[in-house]
Image (cartoon, rainbow, N blue to C red):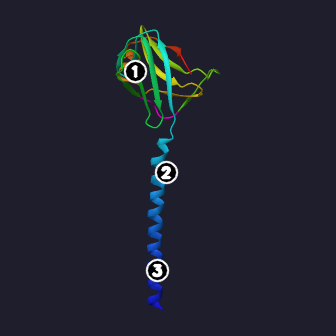
Amino acid sequence: MADNAGKVYEQMKNLLSKVSVLTAIGFAALLVATPATAETSLLRADIPFAFVAGDVSLPAGQYVFKMTGQFGVLQFWSQQDTKIEHVYLKPGFVLREDANVAEGKLIFRQYGNTYVLNGVWGPDSREGRVLKTSKTEIELAKESAAPPATVSVGSMNR
């Protein structure tokens, strides 16, 4: 009888081990599959002033912004230049204050004559993302006596 109990114990132990491995594989598959469904949003905007994004200074012009939620990165490029730049986004979302969600928008902080890209809202979305504060913006804020003004630029298309 003791031999039989030992065999049953070993069989149960093996079964639990297999179930644990299969459960872990299932969870891993879910984690890998989740980023593939994350939303990517494109926004085109004509920015009428030179600006800073992250620690990169850019001229005025037409830009395309690609927000990929899965990585917390905002990619963008000038329509005159194909070099892709990127900045990192803070975790989480910020809700739009205005009701016009059909149009995407960019938010800039203005320190004197310098505009710093601060946030992006894709078309048809109330949820936006805020950029991580760059070294450049920290220096501008230290040098500025007044709080920055906020400037909004709407998208050119939906």
Which range of residues does the magenta coloring cover? 88-92
Select label 3 or label 2 by which is in front: 2
- Residue 48 position in % (x across, y down): 46, 9
Q: CA distance from mark 3 to mark 2?
A: 32 Å
Mark 3 highlights which residue?
A: 9
- Considering depth in this image, is 39 or 149 the residue closer to the camera? 39
Q: Rounded to the nearest whole Å, what is the CA distance between mark 3 and mark 1?
A: 63 Å
Q: Which mark is residue 77?
A: 1
Look at the picture and state if 70 lies above or below 26.
Answer: above
Q: Are marks 3 and 1 in contact (CB under 8 Å)?
A: no
Pointer 3 or 1: first along the chain: 3
| Residue 24 coordinates in the image, percent (x, y) | 45, 59
Dot 3: few (<14), some (14–19), or many (≥20) neighbours within 10 Å?
Answer: few
28 is higher (above) or lower (below) than 76: below
Q: Secondary structure at mark 3?
A: helix
Q: Amino acid at mark 1?
A: Trp
Q: Secondary structure at mark 1?
A: strand
Look at the image and tell me in which quarter the C terminus lies: top right
Residue tagged 2: 30
The three-letter code of the residue at mark 3 reads: Tyr
Give whichever of discs 3 and 2 has the lower sequence position.
3
Q: Main secondary structure of the magenta part?
A: loop
Q: Amino acid at mark 2?
A: Leu
Is there any visible trace of residue 113 in the rendered image? yes
Instruction: Tell me where residue 143 appears, x and y as whole percent.
Output: 38, 13
- Residue 59 vs residue 35: left or right? left
Residue nearest the observer in this picture, 157 or 122: 157
Residue under the point 46% across and 21% down: 118
